[in-house]
Image (spheres, rainbow, N blue to C red):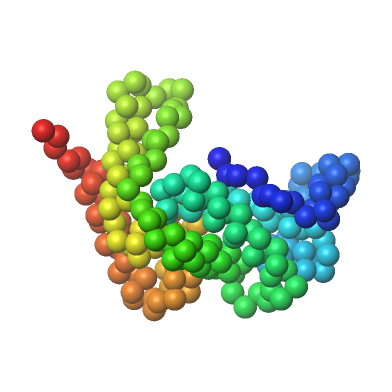
């Protein structure tokens, strides 16, 4: 789903070739020594391009979904997505692990979205995204249809939420952020973040359980 990171810096292209040609570690050994995000970012700051590649693979899909569902427009999400990773690349030499890397990453994404909205006054979240149609092989047609309709109602309701509540919900849903991290990303206190998340979840639950009547 996510757009490719372009343009790709020359060192990153060279790193990709080296990664593909390197001997693979045994699975158990690789898992036992998998570095955390902050360690990878620090290694990238020291010139390890493969560390960035691992970070990108870990987070690119979730970041793209967050942006796409936040703004509701694929073209806009593509532009912001490029901006986010461009800023991460630029921050490689100044990054310090004062918080979890995901807090830093989603803070960058949040700010890029805000900047994009300010530059584009006509931004709107009225566009409804296509519902996911993937189904479980053992799922009945009726269940698959109901799940698809529930997903569609969710996206419609999501677009009607106030920006702050939608942002809080997506940071939790797509980014897996805690309430404290959401507060840090959005620049509010913990109680405000918790309240925004609670209101968003309650409104979305009602929208899914009680679809609007059609005339």
Instruction: Give the side of residue 8 with respect to residue 83, left or right.
Output: right
Instruction: Give the side of residue 134 with respect to residue 2, left or right.
Output: left
Instruction: Give the side of residue 36 with respect to residue 142, left or right.
Output: right
How many numbered discs, if any? 0
Instruction: Give the side of residue 118 with respect to residue 83, left or right.
Output: left
Q: Residue at x 58, y 44 (%)?
A: 2
| Residue 3 visible in the current orientation | yes
Q: Residue at x 82, y 53 (%)?
A: 10
Q: Residue at x 14, y 34 (%)?
A: 214
Q: Residue at x 29, y 30 (%)?
A: 146
Check the picture and name the quadrant holding the N terminus: top right
The foreground one among 68 and 209 is 68
Q: Quadrant of residue 123?
A: bottom left
Point out the residue furthest to the left here. Answer: 215
Q: Position of residue 185 (x, y in %)?
A: 48, 70
The foreground one among 155 and 81 is 81
Check the picture and name the quadrant holding the C terminus: top left
């Amino acid at each position: 789903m996510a757009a490719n990171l372009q343009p790709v810096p020359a060192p990153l292209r060279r790193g990709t070739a080296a990664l593909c040609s390197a001997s693979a570690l045994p699975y158990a050994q690789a898992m036992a020594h998998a570095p955390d995000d902050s360690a990878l970012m620090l290694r990238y700051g020291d010139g390890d391009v493969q560390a960035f590649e691992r970070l990108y693979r870990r987070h690119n899909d979730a970041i793209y979904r967050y942006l796409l569902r936040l703004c509701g427009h694929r073209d806009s999400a593509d532009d912001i997505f490029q901006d986010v990773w461009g800023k991460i690349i630029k921050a490689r030499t100044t990054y310090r692990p004062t918080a979890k890397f995901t807090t830093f990453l989603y803070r960058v994404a949040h700010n890029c979205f805000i900047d994009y909205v300010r530059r584009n006054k006509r931004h709107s979240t009225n566009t409804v995204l296509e519902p996911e149609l993937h189904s479980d092989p053992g799922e009945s047609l009726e269940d698959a249809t109901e799940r698809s309709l529930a997903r569609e109602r969710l996206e419609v309701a999501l677009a009607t939420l106030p920006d702050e509540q939608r942002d809080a919900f997506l940071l939790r849903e797509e980014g897996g952020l805690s309430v404290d991290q959401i507060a840090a990303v959005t620049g509010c206190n913990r109680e405000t973040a918790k309240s925004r998340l609670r209101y968003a979840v309650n409104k979305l639950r009602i929208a899914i359980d009680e679809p609007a009547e059609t005339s």
